[in-house]
Image (tube, rainbow, N blue to C red):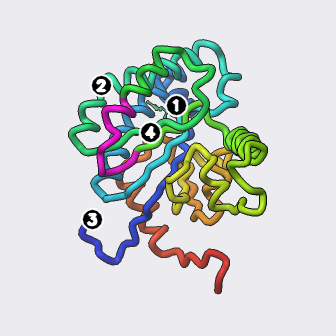
Amino acid sequence: MEQDSKLNIPTHVAIIMDGNGRWAKRYGLSRSMGHKKGAQNLLKIVLYANKLKIKYLTVFAFSTENWNRPKEEVDYLMKLPIEFFNEFEQRFRNENIKIKVIGSRNDLPQELVDKIEYVEEVTKDKTGLTFIIAFNYGSQLEIVEATKNIYQDIINKKLQIEGLTPQIFEQYLFTKDIPSVDLLIRTSGELRISNFLLWQIAYSELYFTKTLWPDFSTRHFDKAIKEYSKRNRRFGAI
Ligand code: FPP
């Protein structure tokens, strides 16, 4: 795949990793085991995206709405990134991968916040893939928070209302300094965006596949990139 010079490799890919629960049900396993398998798959896709020289990969790991799931599942999803980083942090460092976590840290367990701060710090100078995990993330909340901060900066005279452009607005989002999304992938057959990166996907190509996230292999990823390469992006022009 890498040798295919005709392929247009997107700069920023975002993924809604959906279908862990249905995957687990299919094999008679608990939903948590589906998420565990999903995390193992995530490692494979991150390493592969880095190999393809994709610059940014953003994944939706926990939404602000996921708190409404059963306590056992929420507790597991809070523990999973800690285990994931404990197991693979060194691997990411060796592979020159930078880690960034976006979303609100307010309601997260302190152990998870400490771990996030640690992995962000030890990978901050890496120059390969930037791997962005959206955790306790919701796009509408992100936009509302940005608006509040813009308001504050206007009353504190740090910003003039006439100077507020989309480019300045973006500087108030969690994704500040990260280019907008080129390709958004959602697995498991659902045709929704579910409050993920609403601002950042304004001109993204959308790719939906029925494959459940734990089964989404590097071959499936290749297929999405090939499909993206064929699209004619016009950004509103003709
Ligand atoms: C959606 O599937 C998936 C999630 C809510 C969690 C995604 C998390 C992972 C893939 C693990 C990420 C791990 C780390 C370490 C960041 P679902 O549970 O809604 O599946 P269903 O629709 O089939 O029930």
> Which residue is the site of mark 4?
100
Q: CA distance from mark 4 to mark 3?
A: 25 Å
Residue depicted at 51% across the width and 17% down the height: 76
Q: Secondary structure at mark 3?
A: loop
Q: Looking at the picture, does residue 102 appear above or below residue 167?
A: above
Q: Position of residue 207 (x, y in %)?
A: 56, 59
Distance from Cα at disc 2 to Cα at disc 4: 17 Å
Three-letter amino acid code of the residue under disc 3: Glu
Q: Earlier in the sequence, mark 2 or mark 1?
A: 1
Q: Nearer the viewer, residue 52 or 120?
A: 120
The amino acid sitting under disc 4 is: Lys
Residue at numbered disc 3: 2
Crowdedness near tag 1: few (<14), some (14–19) or many (≥20) residues, C-alpha within 10 Å: few
The answer to whether residue 192 is seen in the rendering is no
Q: Are marks 2 and 3 in contact (CB under 8 Å)?
A: no
Quarter of the figure with residue 97: top left
Q: Of the residues under marks 2 and 4, which one precedes in the sequence?
A: 2
Q: Position of residue 55 (x, y in %)?
A: 38, 56
Circle 4 or circle 3, nearest the eye: 4
Residue topped by disc 1:
26
Helix, strand or loop at label 1? It is helix
Residue farthest toward the bottom in the current orientation of the protein = 238
Residue 192's spot in the image, x, y percent? Answer: 68, 49
Q: Is residue 129 visible?
A: yes
Identify residue type, mark 1.
Arg
**Snapshot quadrant of residue 184:** bottom right
The disc, 2 or 3, on the residue closer to the chain's N-terminal end is: 3
Q: Nearer the viewer, mark 2 or mark 3?
A: 2
User: Which contiguous range is marked in magenta?
Assistant: 119-130
- Mark 2, residue position: 87
